[in-house]
Amino acid sequence: MVDELELLKKDWQKQEASLPKLDKKDIYPMLLKKSSSIVKWIFIISMIEFAFWIILSFAFGGNDIKQKEQEFGLQTFDIIIPIVHIGALIFFVAWFYMNYKKIQSTDSSKVLLENIIKTRKTVKYYIWFSMAFLAIATTIAFIITIQNSPDIFADRSLTVLIVQFVVIISIIMLIMWGLYKMIYGILMRRLDRNYKELKKMEV
Amino acid sequence: MNKQLQEQFVTLLEENQNIVHKVCRLYTNNQDQHNDLFQEITIQLWRAFPKFRGDAKFSTWMYRVALNTAITLYRKSKRTVQTQDFDSVMFRISSEDYDDTIEQQLKLMYTAVKKLNDIEKALVFLYLEDKNYKEISETMGITEVNARVKMNRVKGKLKKILNP
């Protein structure tokens, strides 16, 4: 093996002549282009999601909805929940941005990967927060609605209503979890593998 | 970023571009991916350049940033099927220098190296670049002992790939 590697080394060092040669006018435009790094994508996706929730809250802010909210006694709920949600989203977007900024190319691969793993943790916290928030907010809305307008569900027993609610919320959460896993999972898989390899080196 | 700094950076990169090209050859499978990774490494180098203090050689610093980018920041294109088409784009050697057996052996070695994971590739790359273990450990951010141990493991792994 040593001989083969030495042979490879000699050959490797001979390849200089066959390498592409760029001149300054090729390099200058490259400095102006945007990075497409994984961490940047995590940040961009979080921003898109942030925009999605904001648009959604505006979309469901029409007069009809407001009327229904009054009927169900959800006015206060509808003020507090978006504030908490948007506040938390701003917090997470800022956290993603800080992670993105912290990742500096000059660090050692290990330090760099550790920073990326921190980003991964942020993503994980974010997913858990979103899921928990959805579950808690809808449960509160459900309880308030039942308390304030018991007659609208008069045709069904409370047990049936609760079971239906739990099933619907579980399905929504499962879809949400699947989507998050898919989007962030694709981005994080290779990094995870590399991090584990580097970790192994430390043993 | 002022003009002077930009000029200085572009000159240094032009002079040392081979390092980046070689990293690209090791981590990508076709010319499109090569160009993408070269672009990404250039961006990362340029961003980090103001922090480059000149206490390390520019080339040493480049190795580090280029490998870090390939291992951690580069988003591999999903569009391209991973194939062993290195023959057409990589490591073109003038055939008169070698007899068929050596050429065949080299082909197998390159294929084996391509099968290693990103970290192992980085180790082999630095080894092929004739870096000593101290330099390897500094670039990878691990101890010298670990670099040696890991390199030995990589040699074992290459052996297994070549003689399954």
Image (spheres, helix red, strand yellow):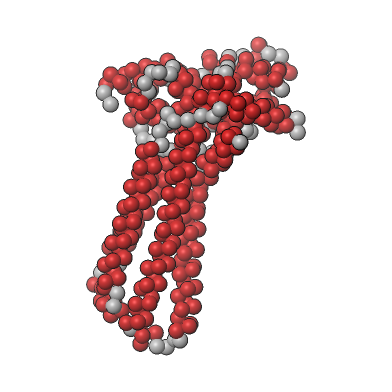
- Of all residues shown, which one is farthest toward the right? B164
Is residue B109 placed above or below B15 in the rendered structure? below
Please say whether residue A121 is visible from this viewpoint.
yes
Residue A5: % across, % down: 66, 20
- Of all residues shown, which one is farthest toward the left? A63
Please say whether residue B90 is visible from this viewpoint.
no
Q: Quadrant of the C terminus of chain B?
A: top right
Question: Which residue is pictured at 40% across the width and 68% down the height?
Answer: A136
Is residue B127 placed above or below A45 in the rendered structure? above
Residue B60: % across, % down: 47, 20
Looking at this view, is A146 or B103 the one in front?
A146
Looking at this view, is A62 or A190 the one in front?
A190
Q: Is residue B11 left or right of residue B38?
A: left
Residue A172: % across, % down: 46, 66
Residue B53: quadrant of the picture: top left
Question: Which residue is pictured at 50% across the width and 58% down the height?
Answer: A178
Q: Quadrant of the N terminus of chain B?
A: top left
Residue A187: % across, % down: 48, 45
Question: Which residue is pictured at 33% across the width and 17% down the height?
Answer: B8
Is residue A189 placed above or below A105 in the rendered structure? below
Q: Is residue A165 left or right of residue B101?
A: left
Is residue A187 placed above or below A83 in the rendered structure? above
Numbered marks: total: 0
Question: Which residue is pictured at 68% across the width and 13% down the height?
Answer: B98
